[in-house]
Image (cartoon, grey):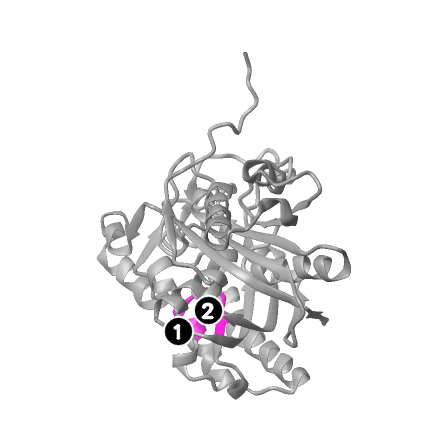
Amino acid sequence: MAIGRIDDISIKGISCVLPVNRVETTSRIQDFGKEAVEKIIKKTGVQTIFRSSEKQTASDLAFVAAKNIIEQTGLDVRQIQILVFVTQTPDYRLPATACVLQHRLGIPEDCICFDINLGCSGYINGLFAVSSLMESGEIQKGLLLVAETPSKRISPLDRSLSMLFGDCGTATLLEKIKTKKTMLFKFKSFGERFNKIIVPAGAFRNLDAPRERTLCPDGNIRSDYDTYMNGQDVFSFSITEVPKYILDFMEENQTTEQDYDFFIFHQANEFILKQISKKLGADASRVPVSMKYFGNTSSTSIPLTLSYLKSLGIEGEKRLLMSGFGVGLSWCASDLFIDTDVIFPEVHTNDYFTDGAVPHE
């Protein structure tokens, strides 16, 4: 298993941005019927999600999150030397959306910019990527932007997913600074199960897939350009492999569940979170569940849960065990300290970039 240790890098800001459009799960009764909707609410815990507007992309949400951090911290963008954008809903197949964001934010040319295509485990992978490059080079400040608009790649007629996934954008500011605190990471990938969560068409595999949505064997209506998830297999993976992995992580770090103030998990499903917590022996009060209000927001669910935790009035520096797991299949864990003072209130926006195309005149 891949293991990483980062010294002298601290999180100095976290900002989360949501679309304005708030969708109540119960509003889907007219689409799927009362019984189906109530079953989803009971199974997943999701009561509301936020859905981006037609022209609003993941990078638009990340841009506002980054601007918020810049304003809240007084950050001089000329100090940013690395910008990494984690998403599975980029603006383009090419170029990397990170380059677009560097331009929009006014960050100087002397900046490393690239995208990471990861979902549920993306935030922790992104933290490790940015902090590793900062630690190994002469980089003082970096931005990790993580954003996702899964609603744009899910069939609105898919009752298993369309009520579960919400859109969100986040920004995390990292700074190289002398500290006695370390960040510990561990990663694992199970590519053998790549097709358990997949959008089968839309890139350069399955180029001739029909776009018409049809009734699928699982009873949902979608095309190969929509997200497919084998819910039962992903559920089994989440409640068996993930808790074992976290327990191994703690054993290797010589910690127990009592050493952590909070466990911040990817918000996959409320029942899954309860099962993981039970197997870890972690009290429910230390496992915040934000998906009731936001749904499963993919790679952004961990920072969004941190924002939710701050809204509950939690103050001071906290030791966290964070874990992301899902699409890939991949999963990861991290052990780190965060001062809640650097977590800013959520922002809502309908803004979008109006200069994102090539003129044809």
Horizontal side, residue 100 vs residue 262: left or right: right
Which residues, given as a range, are shown in magenta? 263-273
Q: Quadrant of residue 118?
A: bottom right
Q: Is residue 44 magenta?
A: no
243 on left or right of 267: right
Q: In terms of secondary structure, where does tag 2 sit?
A: helix
Is residue 193 in view from this perspective?
A: no
Residue 340: which disc?
A: 2
Q: Is residue 306 above or below residue 57?
A: below
x and y, in percent, of residue 6 in the image: 69, 69
Front residue of 240 and 288: 288
CB under 8 Å between callouts 2 and 1?
yes
Residue type (three-letter) at the residue carrying disc 2: Thr
- The answer to which quarter of the image holds residue 240 is bottom right
Q: Tell whether 318 sits left or right of 3.
A: left
- Crowdedness of circle 2 by 10 Å Cα count: few (<14), some, many (20+)? many
Rendered position, 242 above or below 57: below
Residue at the spot 40% in from the left edge and 67% down from the top edge: 310
Residue 124 place in picture, x, y as percent: 59, 63
Instruction: Name the quadrant of the C terminus.
Output: top right
For marks 2 and 1 on the same chain, the one whose residue lies earlier in the sequence = 1
Residue 140 in view (yes/no): yes
Query: The residue under label 1 is which amino acid type?
Result: Ile
Asked if residue 113 lies left or right of residue 166, the reply is: right
Q: Nearer the viewer, residue 218 or 92?
A: 92
How far is mark 2 from mark 1, CA to CA? 7 Å
Instruction: Name the residue carrying label 1.
Output: 314
For the residue pair 152 and 63, the one nearer the viewer reads as: 63
